[in-house]
Each structure stands twice: as C-alpha cells, then as structure tokens.
Amino acid sequence: MRNNSLSILAFFLIILSSFLVEIHGNKQSEALGKLYNAKFRGNSGIDVSLFNGVNPVSESRIHPQDGLKEQDRIVKLPGQPNAQFSQYGGYVTVDKSAGRAFYYYFAEADHYSQSKESLPLLLWLNGGPGCSSLGYGAFQELGPFRVYSDGKSLYRNRFSWNYAANVLFLESPAGVGFSYSNTTSDYGKNGDQRTAEDNYVFLLNWLERFPEYKGRDFYIAGESYAGHYVPQLAHTILSHNKIANKTLINLKGILIGNAVINDETDTLGMYDYMGSHAIISYEAAQKIRENCDFSPNATAQSEACNSVGDQVNKALSYINIYDIYAPSCFSTSTTAKPKRASLVDFDPCSDYYVYAYLNRPEVHEAMHANVTKLDHDWEPCSEVITNWSDSPSTIIPLLKEFMANGLRVWIFSGDTDGRVPITSTEYSIAKMNLDIKTEWHPWYLKREVGGYTQVYKGDLTLATVRGAGHQVPSYQPLRALSLIKHFLDGTSLPDTTRYS
Ligand SMILES: *[C@@H]1O[C@H](CO)[C@@H](O)[C@H](O)[C@H]1NC(C)=O
Ligand SMILES: *[C@@H]1O[C@H](CO)[C@@H](O)[C@H](O)[C@H]1NC(C)=O
Ligand SMILES: *[C@@H]1O[C@H](CO)[C@@H](O)[C@H](O)[C@H]1NC(C)=O
Ligand SMILES: *[C@@H]1O[C@H](CO)[C@@H](O)[C@H](O)[C@H]1NC(C)=O
Ligand SMILES: *[C@@H]1O[C@H](CO)[C@@H](O)[C@H](O)[C@H]1NC(C)=O
C-alpha cells in the first residue's frame, strides 16, 4: 500500500516539478499541479465524489448593503490612463460569524453604441484552486487595464471584455488575493463545496449592493480550475431558483476555457497532446497510454508507467506548459521606466508586474482592498490555503443538467495550452456522447481563422482559439473578445459563408 501510493506520487510529481521552475512567471498551473498530485495519490483525503449541491442558503446570510456601493467607487486607479466607465472595488461579507469576506473588482461596460443598462452582467473566475481573478483575469487577461513593467502604471486593454458586458471579477475562496477570513483555520477548510456556497452568498449580497443588476441577464465565465467553480456556482443558482420558485438570479449561460472537466480524460489528453506536439516522444506517449491508469479508482501505477517520468519531467522543465510556444521570463524584477508594452505580444514576465502593482499601499487604498491589514502579501495564487477538501472527479453531470435546463453552454480552448489542452477538452466532451448539430469548421475574424468550432445538439458549443495558451485573452485578445461577444449575443461563430 505504502509503496503503491509513493509510486503514484512519483508519477505526478513529474508535472509538479516543472511548475516549481518558476522561469515562466506563472503560478496558476503550479496550483493545479499540486492539487492533482494530491488527488491522484488516493490517500489524500480529498473527496472526489460528485457535486451534490449546497444546502439551501438561509436569508440570514443576506445583509443590508445601503450606501456601500458609493463607498466602493474607485475614483481612479494609481497610474491609470483616463477612462469613461465606472469602476468599483470592495469587500462583501460572506460569513459574518467567521468574519469571512470576499474582494471584488467591478468594471462597468465601456461601450460606444450600447449603454451599460442594456448589456449583461458577466462574472469572471480564475482557477488554481487558489488563484486570483484580479491577478490573472482583470490585470493580465480580459480586464480594462494591463500593468506596465514598472509595476506602477497601467495601460488600456483595447480588447477588454467590458466592451461587451459589465464585468465582475471575484477573488475566491477565502485566502485568495485580498479575500480573507478572520477565522484563519478557514484557510485549511476550503474546497469546491464551500467555494460554491460562498460565491453564491457573495452574489446575493452584491446584488443587494448593486440592485440595478438584479434581474439582468447574467453569465459566468472562467478558465482552468474554474471548470469546477463555474458549473458548481451555476448549479447552486439554478437549485435556489427552483426552491424559491422564482428567478433570484437570472442566469443565462456559462463559458469555460481550458477547463478542468473530467480528471481521467483531462489527464490522458494532456499526455496525448504532449506526444502529438513534439514535447515527449511518440514512444513515451504510447507507454503512458498503455501502462498508466487515470481513472478515479486508480490507487497505484505500474513500474512501466512510472518509468516514463524522467522523460516527461525533463521535457517540461524549460518550457511554459501553459503556452508551449511562448518565450520565457528571464528577469523577474520590475523596471525603473515602463518598457514598451504590446497587447498582441504577451510579456511572459507579466505576473511580476502585477504582483508589484497589487502590493502597493496606494493601490490598496484606491481599490479599498486589504482594509484589515492582512498578515500576508497579495499573491497571484494563494500561499495561505493549505488544504483542499473536495474536488469531484468529473463535472459532466452538471454540464448535462445545464443543457437540459436551456442554459447556453460554451467550452473554449486556447490550442497552444499543454496543461488542459484541446485534446483533453475533446476527450471530455466525447465522454458526454452528444450528437453533432453543426460539424467542425473554422471560424473567422478579420479574414483570418480565429479557431475552430463544433456545435452539439442540446446546445453545447466547442470553440478553439488559434494560437492562444491557457490564459486565452492574454495571448489572443482580439479573438477572445470576438468569442465572448458571440457567446453573449447568442450568435454562432462565423463560418465561411459569413466571412467577417
Ligand atoms: C475582521 O476583523 C477586523 C478586525 O477586527 C474587522 O475590522 C473586520 O470587519 C472583520 N471582517 C469581517 C468580515 O467581519
Ligand atoms: C488539513 O487537513 C488535514 C486532514 O483533514 C487536517 O489534519 C489538517 O489539520 C488540515 N490543515 C489545516 C491547516 O487545516
Ligand atoms: C410557482 O410560481 C408559479 C407562478 O409564478 C405558480 O403558478 C406555481 O403554483 C408556483 N409553484 C409552487 C410549487 O409554489
Ligand atoms: C470505480 O468505483 C465505483 C464505486 O466505487 C464503481 O461504481 C465504478 O464502476 C468504478 N469504476 C471503474 C472504472 O472501475
Ligand atoms: C496588507 O497590508 C499589510 C500592511 O501594510 C501588508 O503587510 C500585507 O502584505 C498586505 N496584504 C495584502 C494581501 O495586500
């Protein structure tokens, strides 16, 4: 028994060790690697059974929010260029007795032709578990501003998703970024279940603070481990609407990218992608296929499986598995003067600029963050969350539930991500046994192929984004903006007959 569990650990350490070589400046994958090392160890104590929903949330967790919205208004972020739209940031208490509060940043829509009132509300969640939607989503991916290399000043992201929606970024669960608990033992009690519940309580209270968004069309999007958070929150919303027999939150659809969906196919797909993209040898990929067992019941791996470990480890150590063709970050310090920045050539050291920015006291003050003077730094991925209690081996039943309930379900994939690659996503969707409605075809943007798409009966859309890594809007911001616009409009991605 003991040896067996050690051998499965050895195999998954292959993945983890590459993330510890922090030349890439990206911690999101490291967090995912850690969880999966623990999960596949079998004796980790992590509950992998299906997500059954959360207990009905009592009214007593909803508190009056009068006046708090105006207090949360962000007049201007330090180093920010002029902008037209309103921004808010602040805390929402999700558990009064524990003293647990979540930090949010809200960028209202900046749109030439449509008003913010006519545009939907979109919640964005990053994964990890433990990674920050401010650090990735807001300041490196789809938010209105990006941070210059000086770690002090900002430039406008002209492909920001707040051109298509009112975008809410949430740091969750407690222990992520600026979100905290005064009962610090909470940091050891996080898991999928508690995250879903707290996210839901956050939303109910946030809507009290911003009542004009009650009843607004609402969508949830996210990437990576948010492949769990997004469906679990969506399920929680649907089940509470059902219990209340009314639409408490007007959820219309979900969008998940390079998403953790189904452990077995996700893992197999990752190695197959490495094998088919010249990262590991054909023989190593075959050996993994034939000798490794990634099913939820696996308790040990064979010697033959483990023997591939060294090769995989070496192969991954010096590339950014999140974007296999990306350059590496060689200097982790900020620069005295901002370097010329480009939205189309993503700077691989961006994590460090954002870290510097979000740890500045004047930024905290402007954003109404860290008001309780936490005893740890803001981190892109939490260093205070120590345990993860539950993480279902699959979220496929939830996706099926949404399809049956008429929610819009889109799954996208940046096709140069090697961590949760397109191969994993295709294998996971294949597990769902869906019939095809619209056959695989390229979709276009500005007369170029933006990616490929296939629509399944039911309705579920799969869309790839060509040339994008794990954080799709970082690498292909224009294609990502086109994708979100089509998703929110409910229009299919353009094929050759609508070549635009
Ligand atoms: C946490 O404790 C601080 C200091 O006592 C207090 O100001 C803050 O309101 C508490 N947070 C919550 C969510 O209760
Ligand atoms: C993590 O979980 C283990 C086992 O459930 C428990 O013994 C330990 O105290 C937890 N750690 C923290 C920091 O809560
Ligand atoms: C649910 O609400 C509808 C009207 O909105 C009503 O007709 C129906 O009887 C209600 N169902 C229950 C179980 O209360
Ligand atoms: C895994 O275990 C569950 C119950 O523990 C069982 O229902 C299932 O058939 C098993 N799957 C495989 C692939 O053996
Ligand atoms: C909060 O502020 C304290 C004191 O200034 C600082 O030491 C800590 O790093 C900050 N933490 C976060 C999460 O911003």
Image (tube, grey):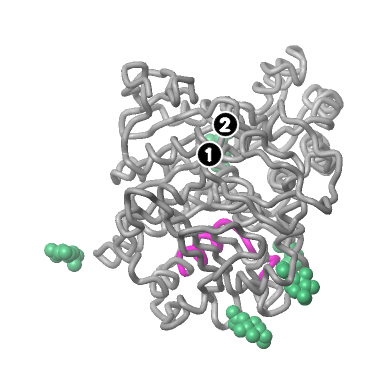
Label 1 SS: strand
Residue 257 is labelled as 1
Residue drawn 34% across the image and 62% down it:
249
Q: Amino acid at mark 1?
A: Gly
Find residue 23 and report its image quarter. top right
Above or below residue 300? Residue 20 is below
Percent position of residue 125, x then y: 54, 53
Earlier along the polypeptide chain: callout 1 or callout 2?
1
Mark 2 neighbour class, 10 Å CA radius: few under 14, some 14 to 19, many 20 or more: many
Distance, label 1 to label 2, CA atoms, is 8 Å
Q: Is residue 65 visible?
A: yes
Percent position of residue 318, x then y: 83, 31
**Relative to the observer, which residue lies in front, 307 or 31?**
31
Residue 414 is labelled as 2
**Relative to the observer, which residue lies in front, 110 or 220?**
110
Q: Main secondary structure of the magenta part?
A: helix
From the viewer's perspective, is 185 left or right of 116? right
Q: Is 151 contained in the magenta span?
A: no
Q: Quadrant of ligand 2?
A: bottom right
Find residue 191 and report its image quarter. bottom right
Percent position of residue 409, x then y: 39, 40
Percent position of residue 17, x then y: 83, 39
Q: Amino acid at mark 2?
A: Gly
Question: Which residues are drawn in magenta?
Answer: 186-201
Find residue 56 and report its image quarter. bottom left
Residue drawn 50% across the image and 48% down it:
50
Q: Is residue 375 visible?
A: no
Asked if the beta carbon under badge 1 is closer than 8 A to the nearest atom of ligand 5, the reply is no
Contact (Cβ within 8 Å) of mark 1 with mark 2: yes
